[in-house]
Amino acid sequence: MRFLTHNSLRCVAKDATLGYPLKVDIEDLEVVEVEYCQEFLTHILPSLSWDGLKVASKVIGLVGFPDSFDESLLCDEDFLRAMHNLLLEVHIMKGTLTCPDTGRTFPIDNGIPNMKLPETEV
């Protein structure tokens, strides 16, 4: 699972108020090189949840991550390359996602998050 995917995942259990951002615990990850595309990043970054990006940056130890989004970041080559690495090159192969509201955990196996809930929880 890429952190780009993590940014859009939410816990939809009926007792979750927001269900986002999901806490990430990583057991195994891979870094897979992907061709850098500045245009993609400058278009996608303004639409992503900054809270989710902050969670992701802390998990992998990205130092100096800004507290909030600022348009000037889209002109910062070092920042864009760091976001490229975070969003597209880091693949979580095994771990868990945890709902901040309910504490419900969801496994990540072979890079695929399983967000399925029993019918009684939806």
Image: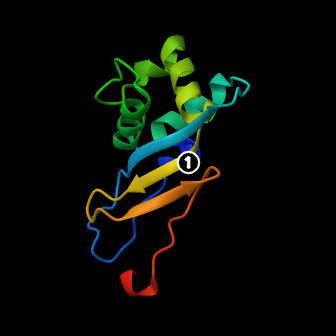
Write down the residue under mark 1.
94
Secondary element under disc 1, as helix, strand or loop, is: strand
* Quadrant of image for the C terminus: bottom left
Query: Which residue reaches farthest right?
Result: 35
Residue at 68% from the left image edge and 25% from the top image edge: 37
Is residue 76 visible to us here?
no
The correct choice, above or below, for 69 with respect to 104 in the image is above
**Nearest the camera: 53 or 111?**
111
Query: Which residue reaches farthest front?
Result: 27
The correct choice, above or below, for 46 with respect to 113 in the image is above
The correct choice, above or below, for 56 with respect to 103 in the image is above
Amino acid under label 1? Lys
Q: Quadrant of residue 69?
A: top left
Residue 102 lies, in percent from the top left, at 27, 66
Residue at 41% from the left image edge and 46% from the top image edge: 24
Residue 44 lies, in percent from the top left, at 55, 37
Residue 25 lies, in percent from the top left, at 41, 45
Residue at 44% from the left image edge and 20% from the top image edge: 73
